[in-house]
Structures are given as C-alpha cells and as structure tokens.
Amino acid sequence: MGVVETIAAVAIVASLAAAGTSFYGQQQQAASAERLASYNFAVQKQQMEMQARMAGIAADQQYQAGLQNASAMENQALRVEQEARERAKRMRFENERLLGDQRARFGKAGVTSAGTPLAVMAESAGLMELAVGDELYKADMERSAFYRKAEVEKWQAGYSLIDKAAADYNFASSTFRANPILMEGQNTATALRTNSYGSLISGVGDAASIGSGFNFGGGKKNPAGYNNFDYGSGTGA
C-alpha cells in the first residue's frame, strides 16, 4: 500500500474515530440529561408534596381550632342561660319572701289584703317580676351573641376545609405538576441521541467517501486528483 493509501487509511480511521467519539459523547450527554431531569423531577415533586402536606396540616389545624372556638362559644351561651335561670329563680324566691313579709306587716297592722293594700302588693309583685324579666332578657341577648359568634367560627372554619381540599389536590397532582421538568430533560436526551446517530452516520459516510477512491488491496485505482499516477508501481501513466 502506497503513501497516499496510507494517508487515506489514516483519514478514514480518524473520521471513524471522530464519529465514534462524537456519538459516545452525545450519548453520555443524553444519559446525563435524563439523570439530571429525573433528579430535578424528584426534588421538585418532593418539595411540592411537602408544601401541600404542610398546607393541609395548617388548614386542618385551623378547622379544628374553629370548631373548638365555636364549641367554646356555645358552652358560654349555655352557661349564660343556666346562670340567668338560676338568678331568676333566686330573684323570684326573694320576691316571694318580700311579698310574704309585706303581707305579714299588713296583717300585724290590722290591714286587710283587699283594696289599696292589694293594689300595693300587686304593684310590688309586678315590679319584682319585671326585674326578673329584665335579667332574663339581658341574659338572652348575651346568650344569642355567643351563639352568633359560634356560627361565625363555624363559617370561617369551613374556609379551612376548602384550603385543606386544595392542599390534598396539590399533593395528589404533584407528579403531574412536576412532570414538565422530566419531559424537558427527556426531550433534550432524545435530541442528543438523534444528533449522535446523525453524527455517526455522517462520520461513516465521510469515511466511506474517502475510501471509495482507493484500492487498498493492491493494483491500480485512480482517485480524484491522482489520475496520472500508477500507485502500484509509482510510475506515471
């Protein structure tokens, strides 16, 4: 094999080596892109799940706190009602005692219960019962206020359930929401692999093009640019 054929053979080997190196390098880049995408996907998914879980816990705590506050308000309303009834009971008992004393005083004075004394006692009884009614009315207003506050607490707690549902959805959809990161890496890897096959085919084609003008087994072959030489004998045609 002559010098030119040797140079051609070296060029072919170099072309194939370059194609192989390019192919291998792009394949490695594709694999690295996939690994990086998988890692970023896993990290992003984990962060999304953690954020959703924390949001869900916070929403559930707010809901439970709202229910507890509502329960406390309702208990306070019941306490106000019970205390008002007890006060009314004691007031009526005291009123009866005072009316009894009044009747006794009238009796000791020799005054009958008819006529003016009766009117006086009736008026006294009416005023006493009015005081009881006022006490019950104030207690009822206070009790109603506590129940209204309890309803507000329950209503606000309902919003926490919406937040909890949103957090649960975000947790369940974390894979879908993080998937674009994985898809981007996979697309990059696919493009790199496609380019690597193109580079390999191109390199093989270049090598074939170089070798097509030479006879590496001996004899005469006239490559372009060397048509006036006999590569078997080294003598011009």
Image: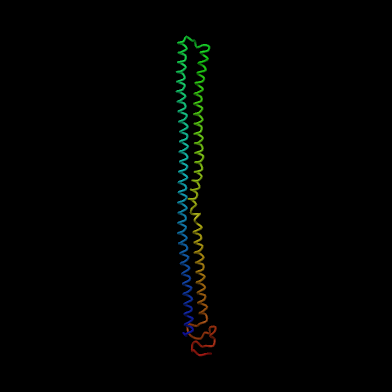
In the rendered picture of this protein, how many numbered marks are placed on residues? 0
Residue situated in front as seen by the camera: 236 or 99: 99
Display coloring:
rainbow
Q: In this view, does 2 lie above or below 189?
A: below
Residue at 46% x, 46% y is 58
- Please identify the residue farthest to the top as the structure is shown: 110
Residue at 50% x, 90% y is 235
Residue 59: percent from left, percent from top = 47, 45
Q: Is residue 55 above or below residue 143?
A: below
Residue 16: percent from left, percent from top = 48, 75
Residue at 46% x, 18% y is 98
Residue 15: percent from left, percent from top = 49, 76
Residue situated in front as seen by the camera: 237 or 51: 51
Residue at 46% x, 10% y is 109
Q: Is residue 218 above or below residue 15?
A: below
Residue 1: percent from left, percent from top = 46, 84
Residue situated in front as seen by the camera: 125 or 82: 125
Q: In this view, does 176 lie above or below 134?
A: below
Residue situated in front as seen by the camera: 144 or 12: 144
